[in-house]
Image (tube, rainbow, N blue to C red):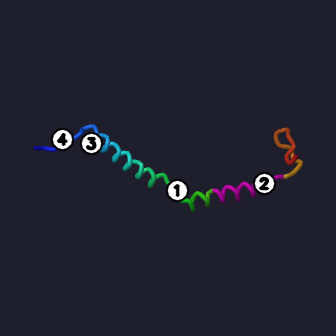
Amino acid sequence: MADVVNLNRFRKMRQKEEREKSAEENRVRFGRTKAEKQRDRQDAERRKADLDGKKVDGEKVGGEKVGE
């Protein structure tokens, strides 16, 4: 006699495997390493510091004084 198979369980198991496969593909495609995130964060901080260093105190920008 054949084994009884719960079709709902089989269907849900197959859907779960497909979701896991899709998630793995997305992690590979869109994921970034910790080192990449840290490098981007440091670059942003460096650019901000560079821009702040070029700010001139007392200069009017848009009707407001800068640096006060």
- Residue shown at the point (18%, 41%) measured from the top left: 4
The disc placed on residue 32 is 1
Question: Could you classify mark 2 by the number of other residues whose Cα lies within 10 Å: few (under 14), some (14-19), or many (20 or more)?
Answer: few
Q: Position of residue 65 (x, y in %)?
A: 87, 43
Which residue does the numbered mark 4 point to in the structure image? 4
**In whole angstroms, how far apart are the C-alphas of marks 4 and 2?**
71 Å
- Please tell me which of labels 4 and 2 falls first in the chain: 4
Q: Nearer the viewer, mark 3 or mark 4?
A: 4
- Residue 11 percent across, percent down from the top left: 28, 40
Left or right, 39 with respect to 49, comes to left
Q: How many marks?
A: 4
Q: Earlier in the sequence, mark 1 or mark 2?
A: 1
- Asked if residue 50 lies left or right of residue 56, the reply is left
Residue at x-position 57% and y-position 62%: 35
* Image coords of residue 33 (percent x, y): 53, 59
Q: Which mark is residue 52?
A: 2
What secondary structure characterizes most of the magenta part? helix
Q: Name the quarter where the N terminus is drawn.
A: top left
Give the spatial CA distance, label 3 vs label 4: 12 Å
Is 32 magenta? The answer is no
For the residues labelled 4 and 1, the Cα–Cα distance comes to 45 Å
Type of amino acid at the residue the image marks with label 3:
Phe
Q: Dot 3 lies on which element?
A: helix
- Left or right placement of residue 55 versus residue 30 in this view: right
- Tell me where the magenta segment starts and ends, as one range: 41-55
Within 10 Å of the Cα at label 3, are there few (<14), some (14-19), or many (20+) other Cα atoms?
few
Kindly identify the amino acid type of the residue bearing the numbered disc 4: Val
**Nearer-N-terminus badge (3/4):** 4
The residue that disc 3 covers is 10
Marked residue nearer the N-terminal end (1 or 3): 3
Looking at the image, which residue is at 49% across and 54% down? 31
